[in-house]
Image (cartoon, grey):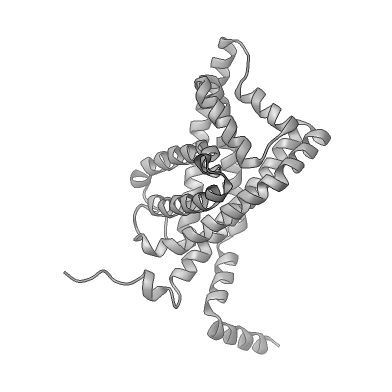
Amino acid sequence: MLTRLKNLQARAERRAPVITEVIARLVTGRLLDSATRLAAQAFLAAVPLLFAIAAFAPHGIRAQLQDSVRTMFGLSGVTADELGQVINSDADDEIRDTSGAIGLVVALASATSFSRAMARVCERAWGLPKASTRITAWRWVVWLLALVLFVFLQGPIRQGFGAGALLGVPLFFLLSTTVWLWTQHLLLAGRLPWLPLLPGAVLAGAATSALALSARVYLPVALDRALGEYGALGLVLAMLSWLIVLCAAVTFALTIGAVLAQAPPLDRWVNRPPPRP
């Protein structure tokens, strides 16, 4: 029986090397654990950052952030009102400054953990060791600032800057692909050229685009139900569950893209040596 299983495994590896490599990478890389950890770090960084922005940002920036978050998740009704109360809090200045300062400190502390978790996902996808902190520390901060800017512009991007969803959907896909291509190159400390990173970026862009479309249908119903049944705790659980799905999709996409880039037929194109001078 064991011999037959080994023969079947060897035959599968010969006939479908890409599939067997993807399965092996998914199993040995502990991708679900990595995705869950990434989602938890994203949530821990996002919540205090939201309070910090609500405390210190001017009204125009808060309004834009509220519009982007509402567009991302398709929020309406009670959940949209709850978001507006958090971002446009009417507490007195002393309380807002105190909560905002605490939120900013916690956000900065959590942000590096989120960036390091994302960097580790990229390294595991390509089977690379950890890069030196001296080389990567500034990259964590730059990546996080760029991600905040990308989230801040979600409203205009998904609305096609006024042209509607017909332009917004392909624009979001192109920008998402660009973001994930740059993310890999930045957090891997430039150890890989741009072209091999493209398959994973395209897969991650497609995955996040599909989830962005489905989130606007599923999340409003799920959040309203969770808020009605469990209150604020329900909102936390629903958002964390969605983040786990999102981070799992990105983790799997980057890993599968790394395998595809190193296997025929893409390896002949994306891993070509540079031309000789």
Q: From the viewer's perspective, is residue 60 above or below residue 219?
A: above
At a point 59% along the width and 56% down the height, the residue shown is 249
Outermost residue toward the front in this view: 163
Measured from the top left, where is residue 184 in percent x and y? Answer: 43, 54
| Left or right placement of residue 203 versus residue 234 in this view | left
In the rendered image, which quarter contains the N terminus? bottom right
Return the residue found at the far left. 277
Q: Tell whether 202 sits left or right of 43.
A: left
* Numbered marks: total: 0
Quadrant hosting residue 28: bottom right
Regarding residue 34, the answer to whether it shows in the image is no
Q: Is residue 71 visible?
A: yes
Q: Depth check: 130 or 88 in front?
A: 88
Where's the C terminus, which quadrant? bottom left
Is the residue 140 above or below the residue 190 in the image?
A: above
Q: Position of residue 121 (x, y in %)?
A: 50, 54
Q: Could you tell me which residue is drawn at 57 percent across and 85 percent down?
A: 10
Along the horizontal axis of the image, is 229 left or right of 253? right
Q: Is residue 89 above or below residue 124?
A: above
Q: Is residue 13 above or below residue 177?
A: below
List x then y, in percent, for residue 244.
64, 49
| Residue in the picture at 44% in, 77% down | 265
Question: Residue 134: x, y in percent?
Answer: 34, 44
Residue at 46% x, 40% y: name it: 144
Observer-nearest of 244 and 109: 244
Q: Quadrant of residue 130?
A: bottom left
